[in-house]
Image: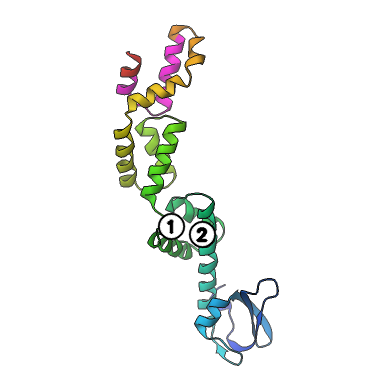
Amino acid sequence: MDSDNLKPGVITKIETQKKNPERVSLYIDGEFRFGFDKEILSSHQLQVGAFLTAEIQQAILEKEEFRRALVYAYRALARRAYSSARLREKLLQKDFHESVAVRVISRLRAENYLDDRAFALAFCRSRLLTKPMGEMMLLHELKFYGIERSIAEDIADIVFSATSEEELAHRALRKKEKTYSRLDEKIAEKKKIQLLKNRGFSWDTIRKVLHC
């Protein structure tokens, strides 16, 4: 709600909401204006009879939106991990203002609820176990989750120093071993090359693994 659309006036009633005792309804000049959290009420020291400017009303609404966005973000992170970029997108999809989303992300980073390096490392380790792939494809997937290039490259160095591309290529092929065993040798080799290319393995790795 824009401050231009908020009329200043006198607070005539502040009422605890029946469905949610942690929230109050604000009445100005005898009419309901909006509802908000009780914590905001105490921080602004609002009371019946006080004159409320449009600017103060806007400030209350902005605090309320930030509080709701933060609660939503905490609940989202309790269900699963997010990168900063993906959580920001989720907040925007819920129609929170972009400036509010940025503040929430900053707050969560400061509180260590969001850590893109930790997210990227956990994602890569899990991803390579379930779907072995080369560095190119892994970097592409990290980009999809909004991980900064410098962080993505650092994490890729860590995971590929622990398990080489060659080993991961062998794992990818072993998962399809039964299928390839039923095919003509030349056809099987073409399919193996295509699989490894699609998984983002370099030509150097493909040649070493397939001896071609």
Q: Farthest right residue?
A: 18
The amino acid pointed to by label 2 is: Tyr
Q: Residues within 10 Å of mark 1 (few under 14, many from 20)?
A: some
Question: Does 182 lie within the magenta span?
Answer: no
Of residues 199 and 71, which is closer to you in this image? 71
Horizontally, is 67 left or right of 170 in the view? right
The amino acid pointed to by label 1 is: Tyr
Residue at (45, 12) in percent of width and height: 188
- Give the residue pinned by disc 2: 74
- Give SS at disc 1: loop
Assign the C terminus to one quadrant of the image: top left
Q: Is residue 103 visible?
A: yes
Circle on res. 125: none
Of residues 61 and 107, which is closer to you in this image? 107
In the rendered image, residue 202, in percent from the top left (x then y), is placed at: 33, 26
Q: Is residue 104 above or below residue 154?
A: below
Q: Residues within 10 Å of mark 2 (few under 14, many from 20)?
A: some
Magenta residues? 187-206
Give yes or no for contact between labels 2 and 1 (Cβ–Cβ under 8 Å): yes
| Location of residue 122 by image quarter | top left
In the rendered image, residue 148, in percent from the top left (x then y), is placed at: 35, 48
Q: Is residue 96 above or below residue 198?
A: below
In the rendered image, residue 211, in percent from the top left (x then y), is placed at: 32, 13
Horizontally, is 63 left or right of 9 in the view? left
Q: Earlier in the sequence, mark 2 or mark 1?
A: 2
- Give the residue pinned by disc 1: 113
Task: Name the chief secondary structure element in magenta.
Answer: helix
- Give SS at disc 2: helix
Residue at (57, 86) in percent of width and height: 8
Question: Does 201 lie within the magenta span?
Answer: yes
Q: State how far apart marks 2 and 1 are (Cα).
A: 8 Å
